[in-house]
Image: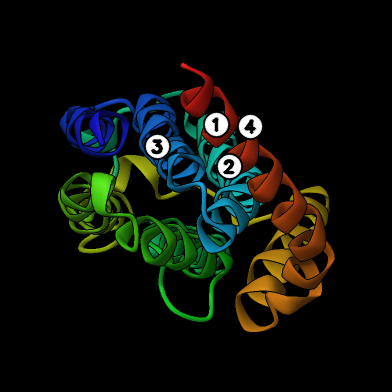
Amino acid sequence: MINIVYGALVAMAQKDFKKLIAYSSVSHMGYVLLGMASLTTVGVNGAIFQMFNHGTITAMLFLIVGVIYDRAHTRGLNDFGGLALKMPVYTGFVTVAFFAAIGLPSMSGFVSEALVFVGAFGVDSIRVITMISTLGILLGAGYMLWTLQRVYLGPLNEKWASLTDLDKREYLMFIPLTVVVIFFGIYPSAMLDIMNSSVNSLVKFVTTVSSTTIGGL
């Protein structure tokens, strides 16, 4: 809960694009901890799926920072504005990555976060913590959409009038990650079906060991 909420608040306070993504990562890894703590098949499935999704989404987010830093040599969020006018394709990939990080339906992040919350909410001992943790969804939308508005929308900062859109190398990096994010958002069973039996066995083993240990004490 602290990871999710405090990490999101710290991300919202950042003025450096890369630091914002880093603290966003801290917040999103909190969902993994919450899912694991549920010790339910649904929650643990969500936690494992979130680790995978976090890897692909965060890779896109750090690439986004890298592209703009390579051209402008600054990561200050308040230094930009209106980049969508000069870099529309790049902004399209940015929008996909931001929406995936927020957990928009049809994006992979939505599926894993939903599974985590469903699994954790069913456990009485962490239900209140789970309810408070849902603030992370609201805060995540806040700092991501605020960043989108400050950096990419509105009038163009004339300082960046010479910026160019993506080159072939950057397309090669963004396209596979975008496909993965959307594919697993639409068809998560491709991965969940593979994990399900292993997760069932893991949860059953951990629950049995815990019960035996507590019973022995």
Residue for point 26% across, 36% down: 1
Give residue 210's mark: 1
Of the residues under marks 1 and 3, which one precedes in the sequence?
3
**Number of other residues with Cα within 10 Å of mark 3, as a class: few under 14, some 14 to 19, many 20 or more:** many
Of the residues under marks 3 and 2, which one precedes in the sequence?
3
The image shows residue 175 at horizontal and vertical percentages of 75, 64
Which one is closest to the eye, mark 3 or mark 2? Answer: 2
Which one is closest to the eye, mark 4 or mark 3? Answer: 4
Residue under circle 3? 30
The residues bearing labels 4 and 3 have C-alpha atoms spaced at a distance of: 25 Å
Residue for point 43% across, 28% down: 22
The residues bearing labels 2 and 1 have C-alpha atoms spaced at a distance of: 5 Å
Outermost residue toward the front in this view: 216
Q: Viewer-proximal residue, 126 or 92?
A: 126
Is residue 23 shown left or right of residue 209? left
CB within 8 Å, label 1 to label 3: no
**Number of other residues with Cα within 10 Å of mark 1, as a class: few under 14, some 14 to 19, many 20 or more:** few
The residues bearing labels 3 and 2 have C-alpha atoms spaced at a distance of: 22 Å
The image shows residue 201 at horizontal and vertical percentages of 76, 52
Residue for point 42% across, 42% down: 28
Secondary structure of residue under mark 1: helix
CB within 8 Å, label 2 to label 1: yes
Residue under circle 4? 209
Residue under circle 2? 207
Kind of residue indicated by mark 4 = Val
Kind of residue indicated by mark 3 = Gly
Secondary structure of residue under mark 4: helix
Kind of residue indicated by mark 2 = Thr
**Number of other residues with Cα within 10 Å of mark 2, as a class: few under 14, some 14 to 19, many 20 or more:** some
Is residue 150 in view from this perspective? Answer: no
Which one is closest to the eye, mark 1 or mark 3? Answer: 1
CB within 8 Å, label 4 to label 2: yes
